Amino acid sequence: MNGGVRPKKRLGQHFLKDETIAAKIAASLTYTDLPVIEIGPGMGALTKHLINNIGSNLWLVEIDEESIQYLNANYPVLKDKIIHADFLRLDLEKQFNGEPFSIIGNFPYNISTQILFKALDYKKQVKEVVGMFQKEVAKRICSPPGNKDYGILSVLIQAYFDTKYLFDVPPSAFFPPPEVNSGVIKLVKKENFELGCNNDVFTRVVKMAFNQRRKKLSNALSALIGDKNIDTEMLGMRAEQLSWQDFVKLTLVIENA
């Protein structure tokens, strides 16, 4: 027990206890005038700093009943702003009436990538994401082309968001300490951005390309290309060699073939 809430392994709970790091994460938000969802607040280490920075624009989404009780007792100012739900099942468009919002949190590592895929689903509304991830996942999201960390999530996130790796966080900053190092990243939605190709086809091309990342794209995308006559040197390359801009170009070539 840690002051009222028992960390639960099945929920991936590692409560942040370092006040300096919590303050740095909270201060990383750019859009403090928009509604902000904090995912998995736990015992509110980050919450208390967010209340100071953004006040009544803060919403908490927590699945753990014990944490809900603790938050209600210790943060009465957030009454009616604490949502007892699984974030991955939440209808965010309905929650915010289609208006823009930001996401922040010390994300449970077992659902951290799913949180980002959900942010992509709501990319028209999500202005910003500031989050704590397992360090290798954080590095992967911000990775440039040409290395083993670069993958599906790197391309899809970088196509719509400007990414920045902010800082490392050691295991000692948490209770209980995780067995891995952590990292905080910031994603800011590109303003007035249009991909320039069909979003669904783009996503399909990226996923197919990396699902067979050791193969040349001509082979990895063969099911999509079929008997189309496509003349581009990109098909002789591997997925990790292409930037998100290259994937847009390749998608357009496939669409127009």
Image (spheres, rainbow, N blue to C red):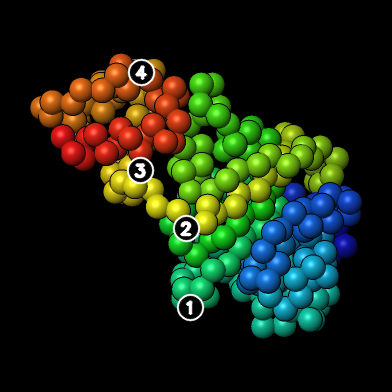
Q: Residues within 10 Å of mark 2 (few under 14, many from 20)?
A: few
Instruction: State which tag comes first along the sequence, 3 or 4.
Output: 3
Q: Tell me the tag on residue 237.
A: 4
Q: Tell me the tag on residue 203.
A: 3
Amino acid at dot 1:
Asn
State the residue position of label 2.
192
**What distance separates the C-alpha of mark 3 from that of mark 1?**
26 Å
- Toward which corner of the image does residue 248 lie, by quadrant? top left
Element carrying mark 1: loop
Where is residue 254? Give x, y as percent: 22, 35
Asked if 216 appears above or below 119 in the picture, the reply is above
Amino acid at dot 3:
Thr
Where is residue 170? Give x, y as percent: 81, 37
**What distance separates the C-alpha of mark 1 from that of mark 4?**
43 Å
Instruction: State which tag comes first along the sequence, 3 or 1.
Output: 1
Instruction: State which tag comes first along the sequence, 3 or 2.
Output: 2
Q: Nearer the viewer, residue 164 or 10?
A: 164
How many numbered dots are placed on residues in this image?
4
Q: Nearer the viewer, residue 229 or 73?
A: 229
Q: Residue at x 45, y 53 (%)?
A: 193
Q: Quadrant of the C terminus?
A: top left
Q: Residue at x 31, y 46 (%)?
A: 197
Numbered disc in front, either 1 or 4? 4
State the residue position of label 1.
97
